[in-house]
Amino acid sequence: MITSNPIQIILNNNKTDQQMVGIDIIKSPIKYEILDLLRHGEMNFEEIVGNMSKSKASISMHLRDLREEGIVNYRVDPIDNRKKIFFLESEFLGSIDSEKIKEAHKNQTRTLIEEYVKKGDIEFATLLTNTLKSYLLELGIDISPILKNIGNYIGEYLFNQLADENLDLFLQNIRSYWLENNLGRLHFNTKNHIEITCIGCFESVYVPRSGEANCFIEKGIFEALFNKFFNFDLKIEETKCYSMGDGKCVFIIQP
Ligand SMILES: [Zn+2]
């Protein structure tokens, strides 16, 4: 039984009534669990049931509600037409979870500011990005999908400045931009897929360790830059990060 009150924030584009705001707040722990599963990919009913410790009847009822609200939809399994495959039809924007407000997060933003005071020469953009993210996490608010979207917008804008038809020159332009703006030192490896290493990453080098990759804005920027270059939707994962205790951030981009 989940005793905390997790809240998911969903952008629901399916609301047809103009008066309604397209933001849904999901407070039910069971719905939260279902959405949490579907965020990672589509699933049929049996798989959803298998991943939750709730009765079939209860899960079925909540799935119906979510479908009626336009948050979740399903398609018939092409292999077995008795089965339904459920998927998220709305955009997950973030969550607020009181359980996440752990002791370790308390006052972390103040500690971060003190670290910056000691260093003395932090770029304003870095200061703003990191204190904003840190304080939201301190409050149990995870808006990583929004941060990645912001990164996408910045990436689309930067592409106009950094674009080159030649991949090597394009990478060189990105590397120079990062250096000039103190965002970090980039290294690219393009043998099998594109691997980007960032040393001194602006988004995570000074942030407290959380055990999870933290560079959502940077990830969004790279995603947009390379999607535009290749004119193709690529997958990007951050596999190493300062916030995970690694001495660098590493992003892997593949089709
Ligand atoms: Zn990182």
Image: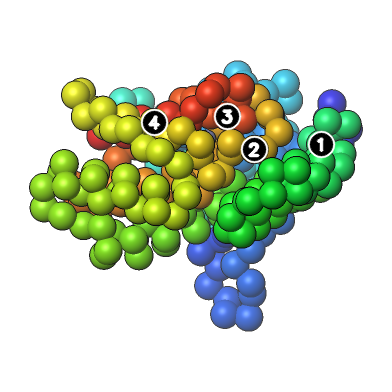
> Which residue has dot 4 on it?
197
- Which comes sooner in the sequence, label 1 or label 2? 1
What's the amino acid at mark 2?
A: Tyr
Q: Position of residue 177 (x, y in %)?
A: 35, 53
Evaluate if marks 3 and 4 touch, with contact meaning CB atoms under 8 Å apart. no
Is residue 190 placed above or below 96 in the rendered structure? above
What's the amino acid at mark 3?
A: Tyr
Evaluate if marks 1 and 2 touch, with contact meaning CB atoms under 8 Å apart. no
- Residue 14, labelled with which disc? none
Evaluate if marks 3 and 2 touch, with contact meaning CB atoms under 8 Å apart. no
- Residue 105, labelled with which disc? 1
- Which comes sooner in the sequence, label 4 or label 2? 4
- Residue 206, labelled with which disc? 2
Foreground: disc 3 or disc 2: 2
Dot 3 crowding, Cα within 10 Å, few <14, some 14–19, many 20+? many
- Which comes sooner in the sequence, label 3 or label 2? 2
Is 193 on the left-hand or right-hand side of 5? left
Foreground: disc 1 or disc 3: 3
Q: Quadrant of the N terminus?
A: top right
- Residue 242, labelled with which disc? 3
